[in-house]
Image (cartoon, rainbow, N blue to C red):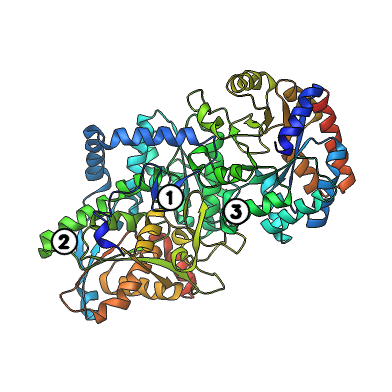
């Protein structure tokens, strides 16, 4: 890596929305004017103190920020190595980091005069956050969710409906997050005039990857200040789980120029990253391609057809990854590893038993990697992992995998 | 001059409207798809749009999504679609062929290799839905340099401010999308389309062809009468999807073509 040639890792994307070769604006002409409008509106909002004052107020009083930086004392003792901190974003209103971004996009939608909000969701956390904020502001909300995910995330589906959202099960493809995103894009292209597409991750056409990252960066900004206050120095390693990669990008971005900080993203290894492709590890098992408005690493076959992948966690079940992660991977500033379903389940249980925290299955992937590396690290090595979501929504899935009969 | 330019010049000289038909390459299977394609010119089709199947056709409605799935399940690949073009060219060197699809299979093959193989196979133009003018360096410019037309979609959201950007590297013809939405949804309203076509024609000398939401010979006639021609896709693909034999599909295409040509 030509480190001396790069002044900062935090300046992307360029004007074309590129991080290196990744990102861009690969959308149909119908959507292009909307994306340009959104970019202009976001650029205005970004430097408008009134916009951030409203965000801060909602983050504080509605979401419950800042989220704590918690020292996981028993897990640290149990693993017997590095000192483990958890950034407790699962304590946010709606139980995950997703609402950080949704608030920003909904405030933008209001500034743009859009009254109908659409969203895609995998695990349902982004859908719940969107439905929540739409209820808070009296906006119409339509959530596209893969039919397979509707089934495996029933509690979140009910939550969204309680909040007044219309949940549309998507049956095209295999009925997961990728297909939900296709149908959300089809809705958007049909209802361009009154509809705002609230994307839940750091993917999609420019400016979404940058905009969602900026809204999620509150995680890393807080964690950085909290660690400095607590330990008097930066963490040595930061770790987060990655589907599209929004919680990870939010944690990573404020640390990118702190080159002493090791950055690790954890992808869903499903049943193992091999030629069977029953995983969702786009960086470790995919190659660059173009989907959903951006160029990034994708799971695909030799003909460029997109593969479905597999993960126990609906939120990670996506064949792509945010373009900034693809770039960080290629330049080597962040490392990306994968964790299997089985390892994530074991981590899920350990976190419940040792810390009294039920993590989301997505989050359990990050924790599983902490379990792998912490024991071999010295006691003064500081790990900060993002506890990006709580696992209440996953108890049915976990129960089924543990062979526990649970009547709903 | 591509075959597209030659064809439109001839249509203009004859004072006729163009009828453009879309079928998905490899749907319902490779052999029947090729047979259909070979039958289109005799059914009155002036320009053939050959769909490239893709797993995630974000701008397409269920009819064309299913056609793509059928083709992919039958083993269709970009290389096989190019082979279809080659086979078609063996018997017809005049009918223009436009490939229509999404970028990833092309990117996966490699732009340089794709452009070389497509031109040698006899492809005349490309419509790649997810490559707006902002991404012209990807494929539009290399394809033009190799002598292919790059046909751009203009839509109801393409306002006067943006229109020059859309037209800048467009050649062959301009494809006006009659509705905001996906293929196979809604119905084109010739009354609403007419001023939009006039607006585009004021900004370019290229023929303007209207597509999306045209399913009957009557609609083909109505829309073609306010433009330089029209495209029918989903209605033909739905007929193929219903299991209709090749001859019956071609009969339906002939009716649509007659509708457009009567304008």
Tell whether A162 sits left or right of A351.
right
**SS type, badge 3:** helix
Q: Is residue B77 visible?
A: no
For residue A108, above or below residue A266:
above
Identify the residue shown where x is 46% and y is 66%: A281
Same chain, marks 2 and 1? yes
In this figure, which residue is indicated by the disc labeled 1? A23
Q: Nearer the viewer, mark 2 or mark 3?
A: 3
For residue A333, side relative to residue A82 (left or right): right
Mark 2 or 1, which is nearer the eye? 1
Q: Chain of mark 1?
A: A
User: A345 left or right of B1?
Assistant: left
- Label 2, label 1: how many angstroms apart (C-alpha)? 32 Å
Q: CA distance from mark 1 to mark 3?
A: 17 Å
In the rendered image, the vertical position of residue B20 relative to residue A380, given as above or below = above
Place of residue A164 in the rendered image (x, y in percent of width and height, measured from the top left): 45, 40
Camera-nearest label, 1 or 3? 3
Q: Is residue A85 visible?
A: yes
| Location of residue A264 in the rendering, given as x and y in whole percent from the top left corner | 32, 66
Instruction: Determine which residue is flagged by label 2.
Output: A227
Q: Position of residue A58 (x, y in %)?
A: 26, 41
């Amino acid at each position: 890596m030509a480190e001396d040639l790069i002044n900062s890792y935090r300046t992307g994307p360029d004007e074309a929305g590129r991080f290196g070769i990744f990102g861009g604006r690969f959308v149909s002409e119908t959507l292009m004017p909307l994306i340009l409008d959104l970019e202009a509106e976001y650029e205005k909002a970004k430097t408008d103190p009134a916009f951030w004052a409203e965000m801060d107020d909602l983050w504080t009083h509605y979401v419950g920020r800042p989220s704590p930086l918690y020292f996981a004392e028993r897990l640290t003792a149990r693993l017997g190595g590095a000192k483990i901190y958890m950034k407790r974003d699962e304590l946010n209103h709606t139980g995950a980091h997703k609402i950080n971004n949704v608030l920003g996009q909904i405030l933008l939608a209001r500034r743009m005069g859009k009254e109908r909000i659409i969203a895609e969701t995998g695990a349902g956390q982004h859908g719940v956050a969107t439905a929540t904020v739409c209820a808070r502001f009296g906006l119409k909300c339509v959530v596209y969710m893969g039919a397979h995910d509707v089934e495996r995330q029933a509690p979140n589906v009910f939550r969204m409906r309680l909040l007044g959202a219309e949940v549309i099960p998507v049956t095209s493809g295999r009925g997961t997050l990728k297909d939900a995103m296709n149908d959300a894009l089809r809705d958007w292209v049909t209802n361009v005039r009154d509809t705002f597409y609230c994307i839940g991750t750091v993917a999609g056409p420019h400016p979404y990857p940058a905009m969602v990252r900026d809204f999620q960066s509150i995680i890393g900004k807080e964690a950085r200040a909290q660690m400095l206050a607590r330990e008097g120095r930066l963490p040595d390693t930061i770790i987060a789980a990655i589907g599209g990669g929004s919680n990870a990008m939010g944690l990573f971005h404020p640390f990118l120029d702190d080159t002493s900080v090791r950055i690790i993203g954890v992808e869903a290894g499903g049943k193992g990253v091999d030629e069977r492709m029953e995983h969702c590890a786009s960086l470790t098992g995919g190659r660059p391609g173009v989907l959903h408005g951006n160029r990034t690493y994708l799971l695909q076959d030799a003909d460029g057809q997109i593969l479905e992948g597999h993960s126990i966690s609906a939120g990670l079940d996506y064949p792509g990854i945010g373009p900034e992660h693809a770039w960080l991977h290629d330049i080597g500033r962040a490392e990306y590893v994968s964790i299997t379903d089985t390892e994530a389940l074991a981590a899920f249980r350990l976190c419940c038993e040792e810390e009294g925290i039920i993590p989301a299955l997505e989050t359990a992937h990050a924790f599983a990697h902490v379990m792998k590396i912490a024991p071999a690290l010295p006691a003064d090595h500081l790990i900060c992992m993002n506890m990006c979501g709580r696992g209440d929504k996953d108890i049915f899935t976990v129960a089924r995998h543990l062979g526990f009969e649970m009547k709903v | 001059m591509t075959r597209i330019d030659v064809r439109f010049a001839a249509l203009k000289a004859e004072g006729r409207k163009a009828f453009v038909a879309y079928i998905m390459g490899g749907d319902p299977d490779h052999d029947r798809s090729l047979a259909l394609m070979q039958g289109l010119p005799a059914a009155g089709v002036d320009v053939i749009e050959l769909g490239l199947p893709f797993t995630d056709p974000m701008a397409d409605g269920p009819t064309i999504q299913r056609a793509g799935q059928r083709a992919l399940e039958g083993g269709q690949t970009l290389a096989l679609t190019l082979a279809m073009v080659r086979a078609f060219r063996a018997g017809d060197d005049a009918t223009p062929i436009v490939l229509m699809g999404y970028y990833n299979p092309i990117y996966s093959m490699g732009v340089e290799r794709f452009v070389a193989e497509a031109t040698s196979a006899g492809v005349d133009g490309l419509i790649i839905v997810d490559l707006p003018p902002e991404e012209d360096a990807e494929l539009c410019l290399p394809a033009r340099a190799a002598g292919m037309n790059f046909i751009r979609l203009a839509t109801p959201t393409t306002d006067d401010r943006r229109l020059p950007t859309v037209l800048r590297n467009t050649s062959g013809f301009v494809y006006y999308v009659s509705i905001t939405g996906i293929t196979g949804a809604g119905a084109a309203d010739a009354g609403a389309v007419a001023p939009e076509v006039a607006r585009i024609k004021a900004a370019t000398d290229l023929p303007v062809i209207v597509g999306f939401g045209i399913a009957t010979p009557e609609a083909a006639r109505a829309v073609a009468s306010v433009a330089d021609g029209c495209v029918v896709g989903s209605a033909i693909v739905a007929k193929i999807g219903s299991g209709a034999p090749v001859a019956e599909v071609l009969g339906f295409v002939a009716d649509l073509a007659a509708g457009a040509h009567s304008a």
